[in-house]
Amino acid sequence: QKEVEQNSGPLSVPEGAIASLNCTYSDRVSQSFFWYRQYSGKSPELIMSIYSNGDKEDGRFTAQLNKASQYVSLLIRDSQPSDSATYLCAVLSGSTGFQKLVFGTGTRLLVSP
Amino acid sequence: EPEVTQTPSHQVTQMGQEVILRCVPISNHLYFYWYRQILGQKVEFLVSFYNNEISEKSEIFDDQFSVERPDGSNFTLKIRSTKLEDSAMYFCASSQGSNQPQHFGDGTRLSIL
């Protein structure tokens, strides 16, 4: 069973701080990794995708991937109260051509004004 | 920006009844998916669909479930004889390629009485 592990939180940070969210995965052959944001009662919203080792930046968000350690992280700079949500780490798993997203349980982020 | 649309937003059904959940994927996407999320739990993969056939399905997707693309735009999930434990949010997603980001619809909240 392929697993994706996240700390459920809540992770509490003050407004303007950096929030750091972490994720580990078990499927060594996975090549595609995603971060989704989910507000309560809403659907997952894609924030970032990352496919290669290293950092990928998009605005206030930076995704980091280390395949050797099977570790993915998301940094949110200048955190805003509107960033308060559950952040889902998702890993594409399965045979080539027919893949599915395996989600972690999500980390709840609370940004206080 | 193109989006995945799902109808209805909320479906209430008596146990044992059939239910059909509808989705219109993003128009140039080729891969379609259904996921579900039981309240308070992680997002779980149900089925993926490509080239008019199921490409992968999970253990959850038993004989009570079926999917269909009846025309060039709609993608449906049918549950033949609903059970109480089918109560969940059902999300449709689509992607351009098998390893490309999956974009989710707003979901259908299914309540089985």
Image (cartoon, coloured by chain):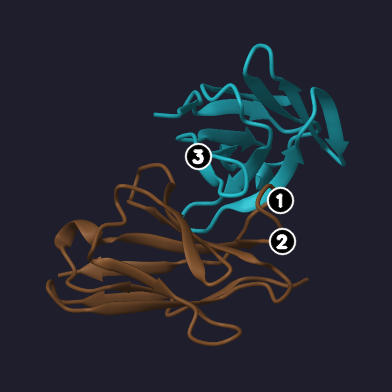
Chain colours: A cyan, B brown
Determine which of the numbered discs, if any, sits on residue A21 in the image.
none
Pick out the residue farthest to the top.
A69
Determine which of the numbered discs, if any, sits on residue B96 in the image.
2
Asked which quadrant contains residue B63, the reply is bottom left
Report the residue at 58% width, 34% height from top: A109
Count of number-bearing discs: 3
Residue A88 screen position, x and y as percent: 56, 39
**Residue type indicated by callout 2:** Gln
Depicted B105 relative to depicted B70: above or below: above
Q: Secondary structure at mark 3?
A: strand
Q: Which residue is mark 3?
A: A102
Q: Gap in Å between the C-alphas at discs 2 and 1?
A: 6 Å
Q: Is residue A20 or residue B73 the one in the foreground?
A: B73
Residue A99 screen position, x and y as percent: 56, 46
Alpha-carbon neighbours of circle 1 within 10 Å: few (<14), some, or many (≥20)?
some
Q: Chain of mark 1?
A: B
Q: Which residue is mark 1?
A: B100
Asked which quadrant contains residue B42, the reply is top left
Is B14 left, or right, of B31 in this rendering? left
Q: Secondary structure at mark 1?
A: loop
